[in-house]
């Protein structure tokens, strides 16, 4: 019975991926990562497509790498803070968060970075891939209590089988996931870094839309 339920969940998730309208490719010196963007987070999907057309992520850097956590790229927190502090009008452009139970922090999920703003709004030019770690039933139960949430059957199955970062759910927007090339981002997540999580050698990437 349990295997039957998991099979149904797998089929449901597969149909979700097939139904999405945009796919993109992150090209690195270490391989290509192919990502599907979720139609159920449309503002973040459209922001990414626009950013690609505006060449925001051409020759960008994965500039924050934490094994068992995330590989982050685009504009760094430090640079965003400096730029905004220097703006005479005090502008802090953000995109309102989009949260959907189907978009969660599984391994390979693509999310949008942010600061600690209470609205949970996203930076415009910073993304991250979830590397994550193994999880137990106890881990999920503790998080449900702490965050006042209940993980769905699909979330629970994925987290227990493959791991992830469920503690970020509901706080950071996930808007896509890797469907090919997960091994590339996992390899990058193990690169040596400085004490500030900068990779010791530049890790560049460019993003294009898959037509």
Image: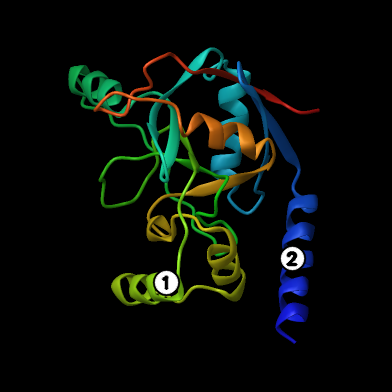
Location of residue 93 by image quarter: top left
- Graded by Cα atoms within 10 Å as few (under 14), some (14 to 19) or many (20 or more), the crowding at tag 1 reads some
Total count of labels: 2
The residue that mark 2 highlights is: 10
Q: Residues within 10 Å of mark 2 (few under 14, many from 20)?
A: some
**Image position, residue 150 (x, y; %):** 45, 77
Q: Is residue 86 above or below residue 76?
A: above
Which of 119 and 89 lies nearest the eye of the viewer?
119
* Location of residue 124 with respect to 86 vertically, above or below: below
Q: Is residue 186 left or right of residue 191?
A: right
Q: Is residue 126 visible?
A: no
17 vs 44: above or below: below
Q: In the shown orientation, is residue 62 left or right of residue 116?
A: right
Q: Quadrant of the C terminus?
A: top right
First in residue order: circle 2 vs circle 1: 2
Disc 1 marks which residue? 140
Answer with the quarter of the image where residue 184 lies: top right
In this orientation, does residue 109 appear? Answer: yes
């Amino acid at each position: 019975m349990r295997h039957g339920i998991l099979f149904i969940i797998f089929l449901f998730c597969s149909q979700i991926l097939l139904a999405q309208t945009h796919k993109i490719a992150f090209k690195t010196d270490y391989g290509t990562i192919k990502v599907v963007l979720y139609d159920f987070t449309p503002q973040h999907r459209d922001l990414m497509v626009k950013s690609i057309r505006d060449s925001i992520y051409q020759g960008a850097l994965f500039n924050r790498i934490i094994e068992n956590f995330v590989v982050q790229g685009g504009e760094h927190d430090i640079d965003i803070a400096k730029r905004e502090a220097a703006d005479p009008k005090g502008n802090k452009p953000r995109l309102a968060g989009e949260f959907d139970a189907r978009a969660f922090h599984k391994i390979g999920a693509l999310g949008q970075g942010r600061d600690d703003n209470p609205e949970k709004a996203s930076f415009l030019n910073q993304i991250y891939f979830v590397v994550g770690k193994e999880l137990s039933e106890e881990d999920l139960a503790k998080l449900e209590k702490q965050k006042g949430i209940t993980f769905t059957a699909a979330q629970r199955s994925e987290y227990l089988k493959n791991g992830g970062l469920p503690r970020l759910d509901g706080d950071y927007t996930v808007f896509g996931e890797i469907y090919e090339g997960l091994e590339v981002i996992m390899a990058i997540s193990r690169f040596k870094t400085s004490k500030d999580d900068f990779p010791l050698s530049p890790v560049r990437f460019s993003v294009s839309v898959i037509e």
